[in-house]
Amino acid sequence: MTTLVANRPSADDAVEPRKRRPIKSSYPTWFYIPAGVFYLVLFAVPTFASLYFSLTRWTLFEAEFIGLDNFVQFFSEPMLLRGFTNTFIFGFLTSASKVVLGLLLGVFLTSQLAARGYLRSVVFFPVLVSTIGVGITFKMLMDPFDGVINEALALVGITGPGWLTDPSLALFSIALVDVWKGVGIATLIYIAGIAAIPQEYYEAARVDGANAWHRFWRITVPLVRPATTTVVLLSLIGGLRAFDLIWAMTRGGPGFTSDVIGSVIYKQYQAGFFGLSTAGNVVLFVVVTAIVVPISIWFNRREVER
Amino acid sequence: MSMRQRTRKASVVLGAAALVVGMAACSSDGGGGGDGDTVEITFLSQNGEPGATAAQELVDAFNAANEDVVVTLEVQPGGTEGDNLMKTKLATGEMADVFHYNSGSLLQALNPDQNLVDLSDQEWADSLVEDMRTVVSTDNGFYGAPWGTTQAGAIMYNKPIYEELGLEVPTDWASFMANNQAILDSGIAAPIIQTYGDTWTSQLFVLGDFANVAAQDPDWAQEYTAHNRFYVDEPALQGFANQQEAHEAGYFNEDFASALYDDGVRMLATGEGAHYPILTSAIGAVRQNYADNIEDVGVFALPAQDAADTRLTVWLPNAMYIPNTTEGDELEAAKRFIAFALSEEGCRIQTDTLGPSGPFATDACTLPDDAPPTLTEVQAYFDAGQTGPALEFLSPIKGPNLEQLTVEVGSGIRPAADAAALYDQDVEKQAQQLGLEGW
């Protein structure tokens, strides 16, 4: 597979002189069959099957067609609806934080400072750790009574809250950990984006008397827009389908207060409501598409207009 | 070139063939091989102690006693995660030759008539007590052999605290709350232990109250299955209301939201807490980790409002089943393995390693004479006829979200009536999924 990809540009180059003809594939049709079969069996068939099963009451042994009842259920039950709204809070909150923190860290780590390489790897390091491992570790650290965080706070005389046990805090504590874990990727993308801005702009601005704030706000921010687009899209998609970290830290609890669509779907599946769970997956698919596609188009159009 | 193409084609075919062979090898794993003399079968049980050790001892003892059969133990997680795995394994025909699983409503969800082997012709079948027989049967067949003892969902309490404060075992709710207040005032321990770090432990106020509900309304379970009784109405609402009342009175240990079951057992055994509404199988954990304190732990039924309605809610043991994918020599071996579990040797393992948490559900095994106080106290309720089965053994309906809802009630997130209404809605999904009439 990798050799195929690697060979491709050179094959395209060879075709270049005869560009006006309708594009003809450089490979015989049968070459696509194995990949096509895998795509069909592992992706296309399950996708359409899930659309059907989301309209049924399904026991794995038999399926009874019930129309849109699963979707009605999904939006009428407060416990399921809670997961739906939490998903948006979690997705937008983590995405926004990663953009802001990622950009600031990116600017900081492209400036002239000692141990820059070391600091860059420190910021990126959490990305390399397994999410479940991070979740379990932070669950220990955030324990309200013998967790390190609250014990440290107690030393300076602050009574720490129940990070994961206080119903109004749990979701935000998880979001905090998610940002800590994911900001490294955002920073990396921003570092690349900032490094690509020609130094001449900054020099010219400096000659014109612009201060550091102006250089940041008028040059860096507008010119890293492609990086911002990437960070927003990646972190928003990641945030909307978040599951592993939440499951490792609270399992959606206490009660349902930190449930998101992902954990709701998983719980319905565990309970054996396979049809309802599949309907949840369809909802998640539609929601992610409905949010991400317009944002993607909007960002890209703004970029072209410039 | 053409030569090269041909070899490539051949390798694709070979690759595909290798895939298929690999899959075939996988599936024959589940069925168990067995060439000639020895038959190999697998036994699937759950991880977690002391169950896993007991299962291993049973397998070892059986293998030592039978030269022609080799049993291998597999373990998997229990709880809702395990339910999921069970259904998936049965649906795909990958189930082990013998497996250990809940009786009652969870068994019904496995669709036993379609998936399990009928065991009514087995010699041990007549030794089961009537309640046990019902919960491993459907209208069309009898499927399981009990493994372990009955247990009660009740209040386990620390006896030294009761002695120190001169308290008496309460039989109605008001005196129970009075005891809690006395313990709170004395400041020596948390009156009620709650451990929502393990969410399942939060359900006992509701589930352990069911025998009291049934005492007030004997048809409740049957009418509930027919969709004529609801948790939002008394007497069933009382379990939720009790939990709310206990939370509001401030009787819980301060780390109730994050504490785990093991913490709860520690508090109970060492006297950091006085009352722990839990399953009496906790006595096994006390025996394992706090053996010196085993005489300090006692048990009483969750009190009803009126002492006359107070009954002990009883859970029947899990059982061993054979899926109908087990056939031929493996089936014979599987039946012998199950019979062995109810033999003298099997009973010894159940008593010594699994540890009894109540009377046995079969006449094949008997309790030892030197049982700890918890067991004799549970036995006393049985002898007095003051027991009733838990709802999950009388009705196939159990909503999956009860433990989250009871965590919310016990944490003050949601009022009792509200949680009860949501639970009624939650069980609707389960009833519809099971295809029951009237839902």
Image (tube, coloured by chain):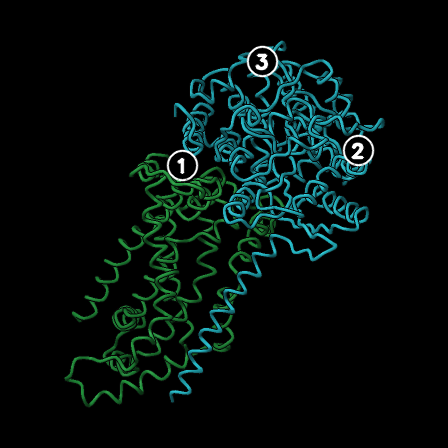
Chain colours: A green, B cyan
- Label 3 and label 2: CA atoms lie apart by 34 Å
Q: Which residue is mark 1?
A: A79
Q: Give the number of the mark in front: 3 or 2.
A: 3
Mark 1, other Cα within 10 Å: few <14 / some 14–19 / many ≥20: many
Q: Amino acid at mark 3?
A: Ala
Left or right relative to B409: residue B389:
right
Left or right relative to B213: residue A234:
left
Mark 3, other Cα within 10 Å: few <14 / some 14–19 / many ≥20: some
Q: Amino acid at mark 2?
A: Asn
Residue nearest the observer in this picture, A89 or B265: B265
Tell me where residue A206 appears, x and y as whole percent. 28, 79
- Label 3 and label 1: CA atoms lie apart by 32 Å
Q: Which mark is residue B293?
A: 2
Q: Secondary structure at mark 3?
A: helix
Q: Amino acid at mark 1?
A: Met
The answer as to whether the residues below labels 3 and 2 share one chain is yes
Left or right relative to B331: residue A169:
left
Chain ID for label 3?
A: B
Q: Which residue is mark 3?
A: B215
In the figure, residue A40 lies in which quadrant? bottom left
Tell me where residue A68 appears, x and y as whole percent. 29, 39
Mark 2, other Cα within 10 Å: few <14 / some 14–19 / many ≥20: some
Q: Which circle's residue, 3 or 2, is located before the other in the chain?
A: 3
- Label 1 and label 2: CA atoms lie apart by 42 Å
